[in-house]
Image (cartoon, helix red, strand yellow):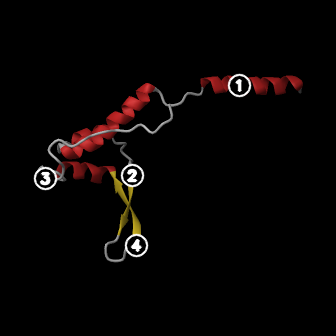
Amino acid sequence: MKHSFIITILLYFLSNFYVQAQTSKDSLDIKQVALNYIESQHNVKPEQFEQSAHPRMVKRTFWTDKKTGKEYLRETFTDAMILLAETYNLNKDKFPENPKKEVINVSST
């Protein structure tokens, strides 16, 4: 009984040494995905969005109904976001000419 308790405690501590948080590469990948999302709409490049989006992605945003003032949740799926990237800024009038693009990493370092 004593041996199994010691082995359990030992395995617990050893497993904690192998648990790894977000790496520098993870942070760079996250930044690239965020930039692909933003730039795909700025530059009308749906393929850039498609490279980064998971096929089953669901974007959830809160909106407020202008008439009632009531908030509601809107869900947008990958295929709709690709269509948005294809059409949203076709006239190049939805964003400033040189928009500021800054990705802020909120993970603790």
Residue 59 appears in view: yes
Q: Vertically, is 6 above or below 88?
A: above
Q: CA distance from mark 3 to mark 2?
A: 26 Å
Name of the residue lying farthest toward the right:
1
Of tags 3 and 1, the one toward the viewer is: 3
Return the disc, 1 or 2, that comes first in the chain's sequence: 1
Q: CA distance from mark 1 to mark 4?
A: 50 Å
Identify the amino acid type marked 1: Phe
Q: Which residue is mark 3?
A: 93
Q: Which residue is mark 1?
A: 13
Q: CA distance from mark 3 to mark 1?
A: 56 Å
Assess whether mark 2 and mark 3 are in contact (beta carbons under 8 angstroms).
Answer: no
Q: Which residue is mark 4?
A: 70
Q: CA distance from mark 2 to mark 4?
A: 22 Å
Q: Secondary structure at mark 2?
A: strand
Q: Residue at x 28, y 51 (%)?
A: 81
The dot on residue 4 is: none
- Classify mark 2: residues with Cα within 10 Å, few (<14), some (14-19) or many (20+): some
Q: Which residue is mark 2?
A: 58
Q: Residue at x 41, y 37 (%)?
A: 105
